[in-house]
Image (cartoon, grey):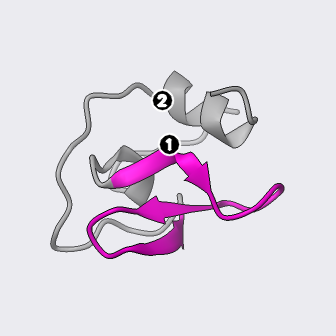
Amino acid sequence: MADDYNGRCAMCKHFNLYDKYRFGSDKYKCTLKDNYYPWRDKACSEFEQANRSFETVDKAREGRL
């Protein structure tokens, strides 16, 4: 997919890539704010780096997690 996830919600440890809003959506659950946000949103002040690779986010977006 070749997207750059740096500085995006997708790389935050509070961003649950296993909890998608609905099929075909780009929104996932933020466990800290208890709401769904697009993976591409810019990181907020609560951002904490997750120990995940870009490949993991790609898999989540493709429905392969």
Determine the secondary structure under disc 2. Answer: helix
Q: Position of residue 9 (x, y in %)?
A: 40, 58
* Mark 2 or mark 1, whichever is nearer to me: 2
In the rendered image, the vertical position of residue 31 relative to residue 53, given as above or below: below
Q: Quadrant of the C terminus?
A: top right
Instruction: Please report the residue visible at 54 percent of the width from the left and 36 percent of the height from the top.
Output: 57
The disc label shown at residue 36, or none = none
In the image, is 32 to the left or to the right of 57? left
The amino acid beneath tag 1 is: Asp
Instruction: Please report the residue visible at 71 percent of the width from the left and 26 percent of the height from the top.
Output: 64
Q: Which residue is mark 2?
A: 54
Instruction: Please report the residue visible at 54 percent of the width from the left and 23 percent of the height from the top.
Output: 55
Q: Residue furthest right?
A: 24
**Disc 2, disc 1: CB below 8 Å?**
yes
Task: Give neighbour class at mark 1: few <14, some 14-19, many 20+ (Cα, 10 Å).
Answer: few
Closest to the observer, 27 or 55? 27
Q: First in sequence, mark 2 or 1: give its number.
A: 1
Report how far apart the C-alphas of labels 2 and 1 lie in the structure: 8 Å
Q: Position of residue 36 (x, y in %)?
A: 52, 72
Q: Which residues are magenta?
A: 15-38
The disc label shown at residue 4, or none = 1
Task: Give neighbour class at mark 2: few <14, some 14-19, many 20+ (Cα, 10 Å).
Answer: some
Closest to the observer, 32 or 27? 32
Residue 49 in the magenta stretch? The answer is: no
Quarter of the rendering containing residue 49: top left
Instruction: Please report the residue visible at 31 percent of the width from the left and 65 percent of the height from the top.
Output: 43
Q: Position of residue 50 (x, y in %)?
A: 26, 38
Q: Position of residue 31 (x, y in %)?
A: 34, 62
Determine the secondary structure under disc 1. Answer: loop
The amino acid beneath tag 2 is: Phe
Count of all numbered marks drawn on residues in the image = 2
Residue 23 in the magenta stretch? The answer is: yes
